[in-house]
Image (tube, rainbow, N blue to C red):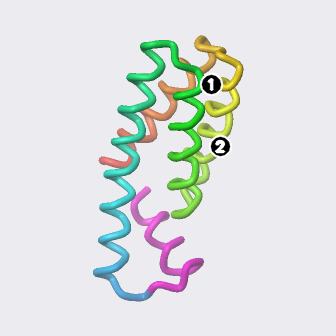
Amino acid sequence: MKETICAYIRNTLGIDEQEVIDDLWQEYLLAFRENLGRIETLLSSRDGVGVSRAAHSLKGCAGNVGHTTAYQICQKLEAAGKESDFETAGKLLEQLQEQCTALMA
């Protein structure tokens, strides 16, 4: 997954410097983990608006680096949060956790 995201950064964003690409990768990992933790906390406290906002933030991060799977999950999670659909949000959180595991591999 790292190679795909780094290729997106290089080819779509036009960034050629490996050091900058590596920095963007590390920033994305940090933002992903932070937002995922925030979503977990908000979901456990059944804060639908908060879940929606945190999902929106992560969606933006994912979109910026071409992580389309996470982007699509976050779109659905954002909607589930707005509707306080905590069952669906929980399932989507599991999918994001799987994406996080794949990012760290």
Mark positioned earlier in the residue sequence (1 or 2): 2
Magenta stretch mostly in which secondary structure? helix
Does residue 20 sit above or below 59 in this rendering? below
Residue 51, x across and y down, in percent: 54, 28
| Circle 2 residues within 10 Å: few <14, some 14–19, many ≥20 | some
Q: Magenta segment, which residues? A: 1-15
Instruction: Give the residue at x 61% y 52%.
Output: 68
Please give the label number shown on residue 22: none
Three-letter residue code for mark 2: Gln
Query: Is residue 10 magenta-colored?
Result: yes
Query: Is residue 61 magenta-colored?
Result: no
Name the residue that disc number 2 marks: 72
Res 20 → quadrant? bottom left
Three-letter residue code for mark 1: Gly
Residue 87, x across and y down, in percent: 60, 11
Please give the label number shown on residue 81: 1
Instruction: Give the residue at x 41% y 35%.
Output: 36
| Circle 1 residues within 10 Å: few <14, some 14–19, many ≥20 | many
